[in-house]
Image (cartoon, grey):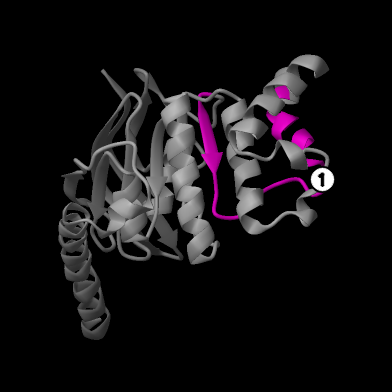
Amino acid sequence: MSKVEIQKINKVFLDGKREIKALDDISLSIEENELAVIVGPSGCGKSTLLNIAAGLEKATSGKIMMNQQEVQGPGADRGMVFQSYTLFPWLTVQKNVEFGLAIKGLKQKQREEIAWQYLQMVKLEDFAKLYPKALSGGMKQRVAIARALANEPRVLLMDEPFGALDAQTRVVMQELLLRIWEKSQKTVLFITHDIDEAIFLADKIYVMTRLPGRIKREIKVDLPRPRDHQIMVTPEFMNLKRQVVELLWEESKAAAEDVCLG
């Protein structure tokens, strides 16, 4: 049984009197405990699709099912991690992680125990009493991931969460995310523009077309797990990378031609 079913999603935006179709008949299926990644040209509607899955935007038509229930709006069954860290600067690291638990009405002792568990998972227990301004970008994103996981969502939605990090920190965070995912066994839908990141993380990659966004190809990633950064130089990894690069090049080239002709 699929954990997430995206069924014939269409999204149209109005620009004055002009309609702009962002998503065109998007359908895909993500199995329970699967880590699925979406890549595509800039502006193809990746983040729009994720926001619809999160319940933050409404589709023009189509529906998203999670555990056989249609998504009608934001819900505790989904955790969201954005590229921007979205931490509360007036709360400590620990209180940021506890925030959703407090909204749920959990008692202080229980909140503290759960927050501590996830701070240990992201290796930030020594920074629990600090405020976000004292943390590096990578550490802030670890707090954001811990906060999302602390609410025990069934599905984790991640919108380019490592996009603002430097290259070295990004690889470290990718490895950390895989270790966390292996422990927590969450279903993950991850958006990125980084091809190496997509292949390194994914069980399946969905390649989207230029606007209006469609699913161009589904690619199964058969690389063994657990993975570390050394897998990025293997022939199997490079073969997958060539496939994705070629698919995205076709779309980027066509998008540039569309602009020139328009």
Q: With respect to residue 59, does 105 lie above or below? A: above
Taking 64 as reference, is 249 above or below it? Answer: below
Q: Residue shown at 25%/41% (left/top)? A: 204
The stretch of residues the image draws in magenta is 77-101
Q: Is residue 218 above or below residue 78?
A: below
Instruction: Determine whether, in the image, residue 11 is placed left or right of residue 172.
Output: left
Would residue 75 be found to the left or right of residue 39 on screen? Answer: right
Q: Which residue is mark 1?
A: 130
Depth check: give the residue in front, 21 or 45: 45
Q: Quadrant of the C terminus?
A: bottom left
Residue 87 is a magenta residue: yes
**Residue at 42% in and 25% down:** 185
**Mark 1: amino acid:** Leu
Where disc 1 sits, the SS reads: loop
Given residues 30 and 214, the one toward you in this image is 30
The quadrant in which residue 13 appears is: bottom left
